[in-house]
Image (spheres, grey):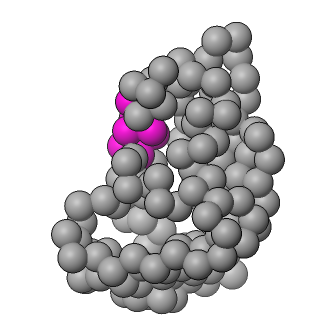
């Protein structure tokens, strides 16, 4: 099993609390997630608290959207950690996190996914998944930036 970690970062001209509100509530992800629109008929289920630790989001959709679940396991004013379970099209358990570092009137935001891969998935990850996920994270951070700065 190989460990992997993939991160993307951006600077957003907004305070950490404004950004945190958009990542700490899964319902807010519809405003900025790079995976929105992949399946217009996506089935979303939310459980637990509206935001913060214990908040859970389950999705199920077409082949592109797949099926999975995220559960927030850690939330502070400058960070968020969530367990991410993919069920379809393949099974995988990962940890996703956001780090929000104040920088004057702006916030440096880093979005990271970590996990373990077997040898085959490690090779596939290096050839395809990492590049694809990296682009998704970049699109998501750009949308998060627009949404955070727009609500200023």
At 33% across and 80% down in the image, what residue appears?
43
Residue 139 counted in the magenta span = yes
Q: Position of residue 5 (x, y in %)?
A: 64, 57
77 left or right of 89 in image: right
Q: Looking at the picture, does residue 36 appear above or below residue 139?
A: below
Res 39 → quadrant:
bottom left
Residue 68 can be seen, yes or no: yes
Q: Which quarter of the rendering shows the N terminus?
A: bottom right
Q: Looking at the picture, does residue 131 appear above or below residue 77?
A: below
At 36% across and 43% down in the image, what residue appears?
139
Q: Looking at the picture, does residue 23 appear above or below residue 128?
A: above
At 47% across and 68% down in the image, what residue appears?
125
Report the predominant secondary structure element of the magenta stretch. Answer: helix
Res 119 → quadrant:
bottom right
Give the residue at the far front of this rendering. 50
Given residues 120 and 56, the one toward you in this image is 56
29 left or right of 1 in image: left
Given residues 145 and 136, the one toward you in this image is 145
Residue 78 counted in the magenta span = no
Q: Position of residue 97 (x, y in %)?
A: 66, 54
Q: Looking at the picture, does residue 57 appear above or below residue 61?
A: above
Q: Which residues are magenta?
A: 138-146
Given residues 85 and 113, the one toward you in this image is 85
């Amino acid at each position: 099993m190989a460990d992997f970690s993939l991160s993307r970062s951006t600077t957003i001209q907004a305070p950490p609390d404004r950004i945190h509100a958009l990542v700490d509530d899964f319902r807010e992800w519809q405003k900025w997630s790079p995976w929105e629109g992949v399946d217009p008929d996506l089935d979303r289920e939310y459980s637990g608290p509206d935001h913060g630790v214990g908040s859970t989001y389950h999705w199920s959709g077409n082949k592109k959207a797949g099926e999975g679940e995220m559960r927030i396991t850690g939330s502070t004013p400058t960070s968020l950690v969530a367990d991410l379970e993919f069920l379809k099209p393949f099974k995988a358990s990962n940890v996703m996190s956001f780090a929000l570092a104040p920088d004057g009137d702006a916030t440096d935001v880093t979005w990271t996914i970590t996990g373990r891969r077997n040898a085959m998935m490690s090779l596939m990850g290096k050839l395809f998944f990492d590049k694809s996920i990296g682009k998704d994270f970049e699109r998501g951070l750009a949308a998060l930036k627009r949404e955070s700065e727009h609500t200023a």
